[in-house]
Amino acid sequence: MHTALLILPNFALILAGLALARGFDYSRAFWEGLEKLVYFVLFPALMVRSLAVSTLDLRSMGELIACAWGLMLLGMALGALARPLFRLDARVAASCFQCAFRFNTYIGLAIAGSLFGAQGVAVGALLFGALMPLANLGAVSMLAAHSQSSLARELAKNPLLTSTLAGFAWNLSGLPMPGFLDQMLRLLGQTALPAGLLAVGAALRLERGGASLAAHAWWLGVKLAALPLAAWALVRLAGLPPMEGGILLMWAALPTASTAYILAVRMGGDGPSVATQITVGTFASMATVPLWLAWLR
């Protein structure tokens, strides 16, 4: 119950974003502008500062990242099974495949901060940054048959990945952050989490795509049940410290990132099916994430 109360405000902000988008006269252009501001400015500022000024245990981080990579590969393997199991169209299967392993960074960092404070945000930022290349490799490779997009170009354009690398490099350098820059990044970072969660809520919608109900249930089951269960077992077996173990389990239980829809549309995939996966998964995670974290305790 204590864990649920800590993370409840984060999900309340998602619902607030949904209510604002549906009940008030904000145009779609407004929300698209907010999404771009969060993605290209606010969240990169948060990630750079969080990593640059934190004390990181690289040994435990190495174990954490290795566990997460293994879990993501498991998600990819299970996600790919949907096509032969449900006889899906290749385009539909390629689009929704990513929903079995991609994760919502905004929700993840917000929960990490609520549970573990600034240090949790730093650990989460480094973990998420380390997973982004693998997540993009899987998603882009599967959709590549429908697009000429380059994986290297997709990664280079990802501001969350580049800001993670910049913050980690600053941390390793041992250089102090100038007071003016530290204050500016801190102010930008403070707005990143609430703005990002509002944008997540505003983007939620159900659309009719080519995926069957059984296939939708399969991908949701992989993302919200199978991966968290495997993560729970890994935390126990590997003996990860409480914070690292909690962040690993929380990451595994996160719903699919809203950027999965953008990628599917840009690469000629089935955007409506991905939008439905994101929406249903986000609502379901409001119940499943607290349950998984409570079970860890």
Image (cartoon, rainbow, N blue to C red):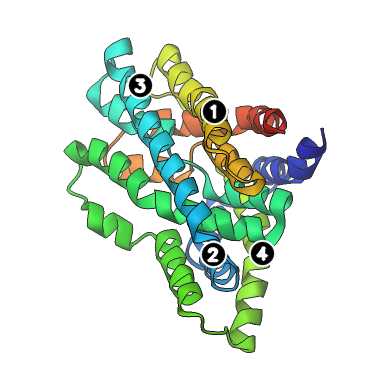
Q: What x and y, as percent, mark residue 170?
A: 47, 76
Q: Quadrant of residue 23?
A: top right
Residue at the disc numbered 3:
210
Q: Viewer-nearest of labels 3 and 1?
A: 1
- SS state under label 1: helix
Q: What x and y, as percent, mark residue 122?
A: 58, 60
First in sequence: mark 2 or mark 3?
2
The residue depicted at 68 percent of the width and 66 percent of the height is: 190
Can the viewer see residue 29? no
Q: Please name the amino acid that badge 4 sits on.
A: Thr
Kindly report the distance in space between the C-alpha atoms of the residues bearing marks 4 and 1.
35 Å
Residue at the disc numbered 1:
233
Work out which quarter of the rendered image holds the C terminus and state it: top right
Residue at the disc numbered 2:
47
First in sequence: mark 2 or mark 4?
2
Q: Viewer-nearest of labels 2 and 3?
A: 2
Q: What x and y, as percent, mark residue 12?
A: 74, 42
Kindly report the distance in space between the C-alpha atoms of the residues bearing marks 1 and 2.
29 Å
Dots 2 and 4: beta carbons under 8 Å?
no
Q: Please name the amino acid that badge 1 sits on.
A: Ala
First in sequence: mark 4 or mark 3?
4
